[in-house]
Every structure is written in structure tokens, then in C-alpha cells.
Amino acid sequence: MYDVIVIGGGAAGLMAAGFAAKEGAKVLVAEKMVTCGRKLLISGSGRCNITNTLKDTKQFVSKFGKNGKFLYQAVNSFTTSDVVTFFNSKGLKTTVEKGFKVFPAGEAGSADVLRVLMNFCVSNGVEFLPSSPVTAVNVSDGHIVSITIGSREIKCRAVVIACGGKSYPATGSSGDGYTLAAALGHTIVEPRPVLVPAYSDDEWIKELRGVSLRDIRLTLVSGGKKIAEADGDLVFTDRGVSGPAVYDITRYEFDRRAENRLLIDLFPAKRVEELDAELEQAARINNKKQIKNIIDEYVMSSLVPFVFQLSGVDAVLKASNLSKKDRNRLAAVMKGLPLTGVTFGGFERAVVTAGGVSLKKIDGRTMSSVVLEGLYFAGEVMDIDAPTGGYNLQMCWSTGRLAGISCAEYAKKR
């Protein structure tokens, strides 16, 4: 008989298991894959942005949108600073990049984070059952009594469902938690892939593969309507664009089957009228130059040919001959470099899953189900997600810890 069985050995699950065991519970982690932490290992391309430096809890949870308030108790009891202290105290040095994002300092990155979590669990007596997909959580007289793995039944007092969403299914996150939760009376908000790359039919993009743009503003237009904006960096790929700004804009709900466009604003701090006035002045001062040489002072060289291609302005035109109409066209493209025929990656490329187990039947003070005693949730399996920048992993650490402590206390009382 186990006090607690954690279903899923990812970021949230390992944190839940370790803290439950630290509270004295006999804990088993049931993991469907051969090893734990498969998705964690590829987090941030193996670098693992474990958290950030945002200390204000209200400000932090606001990044999760309308569902953010649900996280207040979890994050406030295990803050971004607490997470850094937790890993530092276990030998993992961290570093802050861009004054905000917290990463492991060593080259091993995600592997070091997983090593710390596994050691934390093992040192507190957690047991592991790999290659063991859970097919059912069994209930009797309104209480959890066991789980089923194949033909095997394992008895327990409490269960934490922490098997992630549907993103990167090859790592084990294929939506199993939704099936288990639904069978126990929980509502599932339709999952959708977010923090995904964008693809475009435009041929010119292929020539920019590997080119990065910093501090741009990206606008999503879907079905002719402006849906959202996101500020940040992006990188051109052989099929489209990726990076933080692209990822963040995909969190918004829109019809992915509609005609979608992305507009890249290279000068988000300036109004188009201001940029147009600057170009007018530059053309007047440098009236003997070809206009392409003036634009080259505003835009990185690799982008210059495409500014002219997309605006329809003659690149070798002398500045003295630049008409107001052509100047307006150039300014418009620089404020909205268009990508057309845009589609987006699916779950196989999604960093995070939006949607999941509805929060309406989960108590944010304990991560416990309000439908069934002894049932707890942690991490991405729930209907909560945030932009890039360490928010989603912090959510896993905070909800995992709270679920682990809460279910251990519950098991003691049974």
C-alpha cells in the first residue's frame, strides 16, 4: 500500500513525489516511458529556463491570463526565489540571462535539472515504476483505492495526476491525464498546441534562414481581423519563423484554418508617421545616394532586398527622386513585413498545451479535486499556460510541490 502514487515523472510529477516523500509519505512514481523527465530534457533546446526573476506573485500569475489567479497560493508558497534556492541548495548553480530568465549555469542544462530532481526523490525514498502507463484510477466508497497498470492493481491512498498535456507526444505527453481525469468526473477544456513555430508559403523567407530579429513586434491577422500582438525576438527558419515572439502570439485563440498572416514590425517604438518623417529627412540629406543605401542604415543588410521586393519600390532609385508614395510604401513594410499563407505547428512541435483539466473543480489552495477525495493535480495537465520565459516550468514546480505536500497530509489522515 502506497500513501501516494504520482502518475507521470516529469517536472511537476517529480517535484510532487519528492515533497510528498519528504513529508513522510510512501510514494511511487508511475511513468509510462522507460525513463523520467523526457520532455524536461528537451526544454529550451536542452538549456532549461527553470524560472525567472519576477518576484511579485500577482504580477507573475497575471502572465497566465484569466486563469492566473488560480495559481496564487501555489506560487506564493514556492516563489521564483524559492525555486532558485531549492536548486542551488542541491548543487545546481544558476545564471540569469537578459536580466530575467534563470538557467542552469553548467553546460549540461536540462540534464543537471533532471539529476537534481531524481536525487531529491531518491534521497527521500521515492520508488519508481518505469514503462508503466496507468490505465485507470480506481475508486470505492468515494475514495481512491488503487491504480491499474495493465493487469496489475496497485493500492494507494492518494493519486497525483501529473502526466502533462499533449505537447511533444514522443516524450510521453499524449493526453493520458485527460482520459483519467474525465473518468473521475472532471471536465476537460479542449486542448490546443501553443508556443509553436509558424510556417509560411512565401518563397523569400527561405533566403533568410537563420537570420534573427531582436525586439520586434509581431501581429497576427486571422480572417482579416487583427487578433493579437507580441513583442520579442524571432528567427527565420527554412519554412517560416520561430522564437519567443512567435511562440507567445500562438497562445491566443483564433481559427487556424482561416487565412492567417503575420506582420513583423521592425520599429515597434515608432509610429509609421514618425518613421516616414525620418525617411523623408534622410532622403533629403542624402539626396545623391541610392535609396537602398539609406534603408540599409535602418534595416539589417539581409532584409534590405526584401523590403524593396515587398514594397515594390526600385532599390536603385536616387533618394532625390523618391516620391511620397514610395516613401510611404517603404515605411509601411518596415512597420509590417508581411508573411502570408501562415500555418502553425501542431502538438508535435508545441512547447506547451493550452486547455486541459478544467480548474473549476480543482482547489487552488491544495491542488486537490473537489469531485473526489484523494485526487490531486499538478503541472501542464491542467488548463493553465503562460508565455515563454520560465513561467510554465515555475508553474510545474509550484503546483507540484503544493500537490505533493497536500496529498501527503491527506494520506496521513486516512
Image (tube, grey):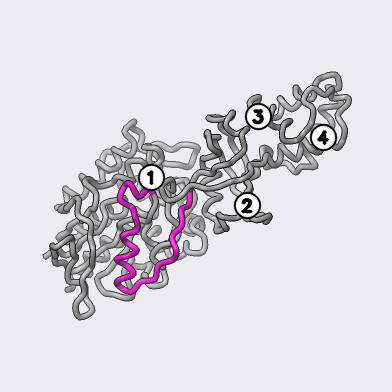
Quarter of the rendering occupied by the C terminus: bottom left
Q: Give the answer, above or below, for where 147 lies relative to 252.
A: below
What amino acid type is highlighted by mark number 1?
Ile
Q: Position of residue 359 (x, y in %)?
A: 41, 68
Mark before the other along the chain sequence, 3 or 4 = 3
Q: Residue furthest top?
A: 288
How many residues crowd around disc 4 within 10 Å: few (fewer than 14), some, or many (20 or more)?
many
Q: Marks 3 and 2, how far apart in space?
A: 25 Å
Q: Secondary structure at mark 3?
A: loop
State which region is magenta.
168-195
State the mark number for residue 259. 2
Per the image, is 287 magenta?
Answer: no
Q: Residue at x 38, y 65 (%)?
A: 357
State the mark number for residue 327. 4
Mark before the other along the chain sequence, 4 or 2 = 2
Q: Residue at x 16, y 53 (%)?
A: 129
Q: Residue at x 71, y 37 (%)?
A: 334
Q: How many marks?
A: 4
Q: Position of residue 409 (x, y in %)?
A: 22, 67
In-front residue for pair 124/305: 305
Q: Give the answer, above or below, for where 209 lies relative to 387.
A: above
